[in-house]
């Protein structure tokens, strides 16, 4: 291969403009970019800077790429179509032997499962081989490790590196993760839709611009409520809780947990262990197969399989778009009586978002913007029990610190349960960290 092969893509002074209510929005502005064979290019930027828009454009029918491209979206639900996992793998390839592929990607024994019922990390590992299957010359991956636990993150990065060697094409990833960025050859730093710096990873990885986005340290506001071991009345109480589902562990059982006013509990565990299912059961959204759930001494699931009208707990789901039902952000905010009196622009600014988003459809926001909006709506809902599912997924360091600041403003009497792979964040948030496994909750190791 030539030392400097001809690029697969060259953009010069290129802009991407999209129509929005009331006019036009310049999403990407005066972009100069080359993508070359054999290159791993990592696109960095704050949430809403244009990373996803760039990748989606390169995968679209409008793309100037001369070679074939395939994309792995940040939200895997956007590209899941089939009714079973094996059919998803074999889409357009009826002759393919799905068993070996499923085993390779950690999805063995899930072949007949509805892919929409997989954990978020499992869904992400399902769409990756589908994206690779068409034999693209350029593979575009939007936050490919954001939903993975530590072990699976390393595996995904190894697999992407292996694909790059085997295919000889180009790999473009959008990321907020330093470990992922370090694997790349070339870094592109976006801010407000413009490239503010680009260069070799060796040159830029420790630069101020990259450190601002990916730096390892998190702020730890001193006023955060720390977890305590003192006895206090439980706002959330689980006794012998168990839920069955398809997956590596087939569910969990014997979960005992009490969370009192002002206490914070972090739940960690491998992809598919049931963290999201556990939070759903706590919120009244999923009847457990055994055991009991009580919120402020009110027993759930006595007569119903779902009980969400209790007014005690509220959940911020892993995919925040699941909670949006209105056509504008302003209308979404007004749905909650506790937020209806707040001016939408001021509320958005308090979340580190632009007040100009108030009249946008919440589904049109970037993933990070949607996550901040959902978290703000939940954290300021004044519910006594708040359940957060992967609140920092795909957020840069500034976004993660903003979430910590938001937690600092929650009432001191609020009980918090946070499911996350981000152990550093859980500890900075003052959580007592527990690991979920098939046999229940145990103190998480160091």
Image: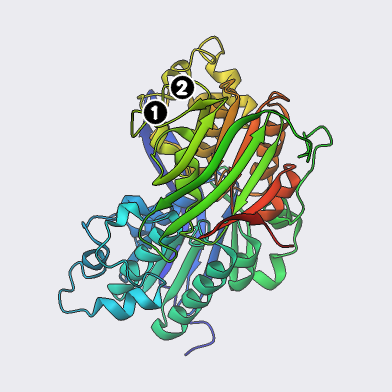
Q: Which mark is residue 437?
A: none
Residue 8 image-quadrant placement: bottom left
Residue 260, visible in the rendered structure: yes
The local secondary structure at tag 1 comes to loop
Residue 65, visible in the rendered structure: no
Q: Position of residue 403 (x, y in %)?
A: 65, 38
Q: Which residue does the numbered mark 2 point to in the structure image?
A: 310
Instruction: Name the residue: 58% across, 71% down.
Output: 184
10 Å crowding of disc 1: few (<14), some (14-19), many (20+): some
Q: Which residue does the numbered mark 1 point to in the structure image?
A: 307
Viewer-nearest residue: 370 or 248 = 248
Marks 1,2: beta carbons within 8 A: yes
Number of marks drawn = 2
Q: Calculate the distance from the C-alpha at mark 1 to the C-alpha at mark 2.
A: 7 Å
Residue at the far right: name it.
222
Q: Position of residue 75 (x, y in %)?
A: 41, 51
Q: Is residue 336 left or right of residue 430?
A: left
Residue at the far bottom: name it.
1
Q: Position of residue 54 (x, y in %)?
A: 44, 53
Against 340, residue 318 (above or below) is below
Residue 228 image-quadrant placement: top right
Residue at the far left: name it.
94
Q: Is residue 102 left or right of residue 150?
A: left
Viewer-nearest residue: 313 or 55 = 313
Against 232, residue 429 (above or below) is below
Instruction: Name the residue: 54% across, 28% down.
Output: 295
Q: Position of residue 66 (x, y in %)?
A: 32, 69
Viewer-nearest residue: 345 or 325 = 325
Residue at the far top: name it.
341
Q: Specify the quadrant that holds the C terminus.
A: bottom right
Instruction: Name the residue: 66% across, 27% down.
Output: 414
Instruction: Name the residue: 39% across, 63% down.
Output: 247
């Amino acid at each position: 291969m030539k030392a400097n092969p001809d690029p697969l893509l060259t953009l010069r002074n290129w802009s991407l403009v999209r129509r929005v209510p009331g006019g036009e929005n310049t999403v990407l502005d005066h972009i100069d970019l080359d993508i070359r064979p054999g290159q791993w290019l990592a696109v960095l930027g704050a949430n809403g800077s244009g990373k996803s828009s760039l990748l989606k454009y390169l995968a679209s029918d409008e793309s100037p790429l001369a070679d074939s491209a395939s994309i792995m979206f940040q939200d895997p639900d956007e590209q899941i179509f089939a009714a079973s996992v094996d059919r998803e793998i074999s889409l357009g390839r009826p002759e393919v032997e799905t068993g070996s592929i499923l085993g390779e990607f950690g999805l063995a024994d899930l072949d007949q499962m509805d892919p929409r019922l997989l954990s978020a990390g499992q869904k992400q590992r399902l769409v990756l081989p589908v994206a690779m299957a068409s034999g693209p010359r350029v593979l575009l991956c939007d936050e490919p490790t954001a939903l993975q636990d530590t072990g699976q993150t390393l595996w995904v990065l190894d697999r992407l590196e292996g694909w790059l060697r085997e295919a000889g094409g180009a790999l473009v990833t959008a990321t907020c993760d330093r470990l992922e960025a370090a694997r790349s050859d070339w870094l592109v730093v976006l801010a407000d839709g413009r490239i503010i710096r680009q260069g070799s990873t060796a040159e830029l990885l420790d630069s101020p611009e990259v450190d601002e986005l990916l730096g390892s340290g998190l702020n730890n506001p001193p006023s955060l409520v720390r977890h305590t071991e003192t006895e206090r009345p439980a706002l959330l109480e689980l006794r012998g809780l168990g839920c069955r589902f398809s997956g590596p562990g087939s569910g969990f059982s014997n979960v005992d947990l009490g969370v009192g006013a002002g206490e914070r509990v972090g739940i960690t565990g491998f992809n598919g262990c049931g963290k999201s299912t556990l939070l759903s059961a706590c919120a009244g959204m999923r009847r457990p197969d055994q055991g009991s759930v009580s919120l402020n001494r009110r027993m759930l699931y006595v007569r119903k399989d779902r009980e969400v009208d209790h007014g005690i707990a509220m959940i911020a789901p892993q995919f925040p778009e699941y909670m949006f039902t209105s056509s504008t952000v302003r209308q979404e905010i007004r749905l909650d009586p506790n937020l209806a009196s707040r001016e939408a622009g001021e509320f958005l600014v308090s979340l580190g978002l632009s007040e100009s988003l108030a009249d946008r459809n919440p589904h049109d926001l970037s993933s990070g913007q949607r996550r901040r909006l959902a978290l703000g709506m939940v954290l300021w809902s004044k519910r006594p029990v708040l359940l957060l599912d992967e609140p920092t997924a795909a957020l840069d360091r500034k976004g993660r610190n903003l979430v910590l600041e938001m937690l600092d403003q929650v009432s001191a009497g609020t009980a918090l349960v946070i499911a996350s792979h981000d152990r550093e964040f859980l500890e900075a948030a003052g959580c007592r960290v527990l690991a979920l496994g098939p046999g229940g909750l145990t103190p998480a190791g160091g």
